[in-house]
Image (cartoon, rainbow, N blue to C red):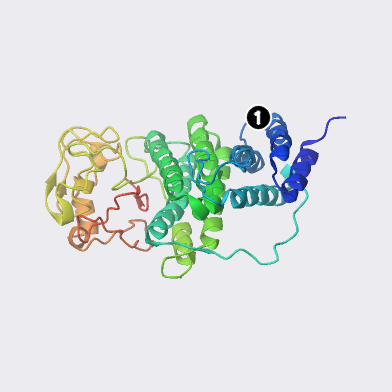
Amino acid sequence: MALTITELFNDSTTREIGGIAPDQVNLIVSDLIGVQQGLSDAFPQVTDLTSLHAHVIINQLNEEIASVENANSATGTPILGTNLGEFVGRAINDIHRDIIDIAQADPGLQAVFNPTPLPALNTPPAPFHDDATQTAFLTQFIQDSNHLGQAAIAIENNGFNGDSAALIEQIQTFEQNANAFDQSQGGLWSARFWNELRADGTAGTAANALIDGLQTHNADEVNAAAQQLAMNASDLAANNLKADGGSYADVVAAAQATAVTPAAGQASGGGTEPQASGGPQDPAAGSNHDPRPGANGEDAQASAGASQEPGADGSHTSHGAEHGANGHGGAGKLNDLAAANLHGTFTTQGAERGDAHGGAGTFHDLTAGAPDFVPLGHPTHAGGVHDDMHVHLAHMWAG
């Protein structure tokens, strides 16, 4: 009689606890592939939070299988593009425990897959003390994880009227950036967190579900993905400390407090979207991702901008001016906002953001009652709000 997927996983647990000797690798991999196949058969697509949890496990198993296959390889052998160094065993342990935790927290999933919990650790793992670069990344990751989900729910609540295409591009960039950053870190940091951050981990799985929900107008999938992204960010926040030794609790609270309200009755001509500034997209003349023209509050006039299909003579001029008071736009579009909604060719934005936004670099959220966000200074723009590595999706507005 064939083993159930729960029995297969429990068998892999026993073998891994005993040590992943060369003669155990194929047996463990066979068990884990069987679990993947069984979960894929039971949950062929994401329709709700339980099926999303199943797909998170399916994808995390790719990471665990690759790690098991390389458990006896030379130290430093890249695993799925990441050099975990001496910490391959730690990666296997963290992924395996995370899969068990996901299943144990979801009664719906337990009806199909109910692995036996592992004994508690003698010493709980200490939060990882991030360096300055990791702190900046994780701060932005927490914000983006919440704001992208909030923006998608706002579109869903508005009958899926909104610029989903632009938001999907931002979600894809978020996923790519998180995956690339984790790969670049390697070592213990990646061993502990790649199953949360990678494209084949929780963040990537939830991001793809959010995209699919927007494309298919599946409200349940959008809500499940948004919830999963927020929970994943909170989980990471609890397992890390900032460079100064502080917690990320304030970052999580600020990100969750943001409210996104779509402009009523406006679709791609004026919906509410998160805005990216200083991201990795190729900056073209006049595009919003170019931090150079008009930086620090100086006048900026964009023409024939390229990013996110801005129209001629107005594209993303606010970002060319780094949110200064004097960015100008003509008949073009900002995040596909219609000309009439280009914030009065920046008269509204200029008034709300003010000269200080260019010079002092303050990064404001225009949502009513929302707090300002701490700027991440660009190395070549004193007081600017651009970060040379990350896409900033921290603020949103109605058209």
For the C terminus, the image quarter is top left
Using residue 297 as the reference point, say whether residue 210 is left or right of it: right
Residue 251 is situated, as x and y percent measured from the top left of the image, at 44, 62
Residue found at x 31% / y 58%: 376
Residue 298 is situated, as x and y percent measured from the top left of the image, at 12, 53
The answer to whether residue 112 of the structure is visible from this angle is: no
The foreground one among 214 and 108 is: 108
Q: How many marks?
A: 1
Residue found at x 53% / y 56%: 236
Using residue 290 as the reference point, say whether residue 127 is left or right of it: right
Q: Above or below — where is 213 with respect to 256?
A: above
Residue found at x 48% / y 37%: 159
Residue position marked by numbered label 1 in the rendering: 44
Q: Amino acid at mark 1?
A: Pro
Residue at the front extreme of this rendering: 74
Q: Above or below — where is 385 with respect to 338?
A: below
Using residue 29 as the reference point, say whether residue 156 is left or right of it: left
Residue 339 is situated, as x and y percent measured from the top left of the image, at 23, 37
Residue found at x 80% / y 35%: 4
Residue 6 is situated, as x and y percent measured from the top left of the image, at 78, 41
